[in-house]
Image (spheres, grey):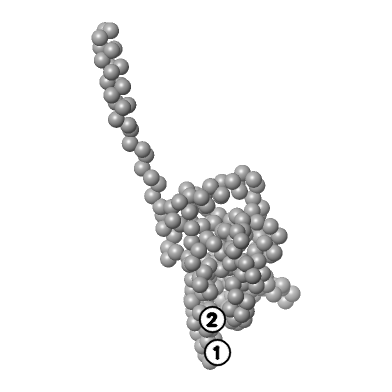
Amino acid sequence: MPHLIDNRTALHFIKHYQRLLLEVVAHPSFPKPETGDVDYLVLLKEARDWMLEHPQVLEDALAALRKTKKPLPSDVEQAVHSMRLGRWVYLRDTAHYSILLPLTANECAQAYAVKSLTTRLRDMTGCSGLVLQTALMNYAGGIATDGLVGTVAYLGPGYRESYGEYLAQARTQGQFYQQQLPAVETACVPPPPAAPSAEAPARKTVRARKAVKKS
């Protein structure tokens, strides 16, 4: 199905990712909920956020799984290590993927072609043209969300137009990524201002000469 990775591969990731996040919940440093009645997906999001904000917690959770002799599969572990948690502009969909940009996009913005696991972004959020919080990762030969999505705000027409321009610039600058996240966020260098034409100083010289003659 368009916008989704292979279903079997997606279920494989979800199964083991949840195991990892539950280890994070069990970690001594994880802030325990004040009440016992916590939505499961909310708990997983909180565990994801805590894990990515505290790399040592991730390593401890991975080590705990190894001790059970059921370590995280290497492909899932690699995907987790590649994750980038943030607020993203979900601009729109194409026939095959969703287009996301960093919320802080500018003239040097990067943009990403993103697929989902088992549920399309549009089906989770109801529409595009909004800001959402999720983790992007390298998985299954492309860029995907981790499936834990929170909606932050909807974009007005003016903002959608601005981010559309940033997307066009990202394509022009070679910073539209479809296969994998770049190793680092590379800063582009704005093009230098155009050199003044040779005619401009010549015209000024002529005017200057006329002024001299009049004087």
State the residue at coordinates (43%, 52%). 173
Q: Is residue 165 above or below residue 66?
A: above
Q: Position of residue 48 (x, y in %)?
A: 58, 72
Q: Amino acid at mark 1?
A: Lys
Q: Which residue is mark 1?
A: 70
Quarter the C terminus occupies: top left
The residue nearer to you, when weighing 48 against 76, is 76
Most extreme residue toward the right is 37
* Image vertical order of residue 56 relative to residue 164, above or below: below
> For this rendering, which residue is in front, 187 or 69?
187
Going by the numbered disc 2, the residue's amino acid type is Ala
Residue at point 60%, 59% (across, down): 94
Front position among marks 1 and 2: 1
Q: Is residue 27 above or below residue 143?
A: below
Q: Residue 73: x and y, percent?
A: 52, 84
Q: Which residue is mark 2?
A: 61
Image: 30 above or below 156: below
**SS of the residue under disc 2:** helix
Mark 2 burial class by Cα count in 10 Å: few <14, some 14-19, many 20+: many
Nearest to the observer: residue 80 or residue 191 = 191
Q: Is residue 63 visible?
A: yes
The numbered mark, 1 or 2, whose residue comes first in the sequence reads 2
- Residue 32 picture location, percent across and down: 64, 75
Q: Residue at x 29, y 30 (%)?
A: 198
Q: Pick the residue in front: 118 or 187.
A: 118
To which quarter of the image does residue 124 belong? bottom right
* Distance CA(mark 1)–CA(mark 2): 12 Å
